[in-house]
């Protein structure tokens, strides 16, 4: 291959690599100064007045209708996808309120006399949830001194398609949800501090494993609302 053609090919390859390199971006702000301590959670968080939150897991049983019964994950928007009824916004609802909502929605139209039971299988309030492009997404116990790098390590690290420069942490502050973006590359280099995480925090790593609904949520939240209550 002629030298000039070889140089041109190498240049194209380098351009392609640069184009694919992970970068910062998106509407969620970085270097947020007021990312405060989250709201304290009640000791008895699963009493009857417990309010369902994003990333919780609920069990809905419609007696004698097995096709409608199952375990449902609450997404970042506070929604579940329920057969026949489509998406239901369950954030802030108690198990009793969700029971009544599903019962009334099914009554007559789909089930003559629905008998519904709702339970909370998992709560994110005393755990830290890690989702997106990590090797083992999941919910992990919130311990003292747990930081962003450590919780990513608990999830077995980033997968091959992760963007380490765009990791979003959601946190409940003063009764409202806030979000901030972090750059793991800068944190590992010591250029930025490794932020402490708390019970109820939700960590989302950008990448190919990000669910379409989560990606849409991250892209649709207005910039002015982020890192102010919303």
Image: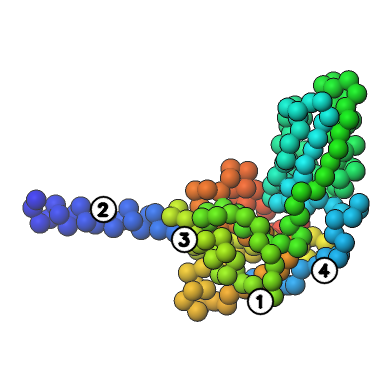
Residue that mark 1 sits on: 145
Picture coordinates of residue 146, whole percent (x, y): 64, 72
Q: Earlier in the sequence, mark 1 or mark 3?
A: 3
In front of the other: label 3 or label 4? 4
In the displayed image of the protein, which residue is found farthest to the left? Answer: 2
* Residue 47 at least partly seen: yes
Cα distance between the residues tagged 1 and 2: 45 Å
Pick the residue in front: 224 or 30: 30
Q: List the residue tagged with mark 2.
A: 12
Mark 1 to mark 3: distance in Å?
28 Å
What residue is drawn where x is 77% and y is 45%?
A: 58
Q: Is residue 8 left or right of residue 175?
A: left
Graded by Cα atoms within 10 Å as few (under 14), some (14 to 19) or many (20 or more), the crowding at tag 4 reads: some
- Residue 46 picture location, percent across and down: 85, 56
Q: Neighbour class for label 1 at 10 Å: few (<14), some, many (≥20)?
A: few
In the rendered image, the vertical position of residue 148 relative to residue 155, given as above or below: below
| Circle 4 residue | 40
- For marks 2 and 3, give the CA distance: 19 Å
């Amino acid at each position: 291959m002629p030298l000039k053609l070889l140089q041109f090919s190498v240049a194209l390859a380098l351009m392609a690599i640069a184009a694919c390199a992970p970068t910062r971006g998106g509407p969620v702000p970085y270097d947020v100064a007021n990312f405060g301590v989250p709201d304290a959670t009640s000791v008895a968080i699963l009493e009857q007045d417990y309010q369902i939150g994003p990333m919780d897991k609920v069990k809905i049983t419609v007696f004698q209708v097995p096709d409608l019964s199952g375990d449902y994950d609450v997404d970042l928007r506070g929604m579940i996808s329920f057969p026949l009824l489509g998406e239901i916004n369950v954030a802030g609802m108690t198990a009793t309120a969700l029971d009544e909502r599903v019962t009334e929605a099914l009554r007559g139209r789909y089930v003559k006399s629905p008998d519904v039971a709702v339970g909370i299988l998992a709560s994110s309030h005393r755990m830290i949830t890690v989702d997106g492009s990590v090797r083992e997404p999941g919910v992990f116990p919130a311990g003292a001194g747990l930081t962003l790098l450590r919780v990513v390590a608990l999830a077995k690290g980033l997968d091959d398609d992760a963007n380490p420069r765009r990791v979003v942490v959601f946190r409940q502050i003063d009764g409202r949800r806030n979000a901030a973006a972090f750059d793991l590359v800068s944190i590992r280099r010591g250029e930025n501090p490794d932020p402490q995480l708390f019970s109820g925090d939700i960590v989302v790593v950008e990448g190919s494993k990000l669910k379409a609904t989560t990606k849409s949520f991250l892209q649709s939240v207005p910039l002015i609302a982020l890192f102010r209550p919303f």
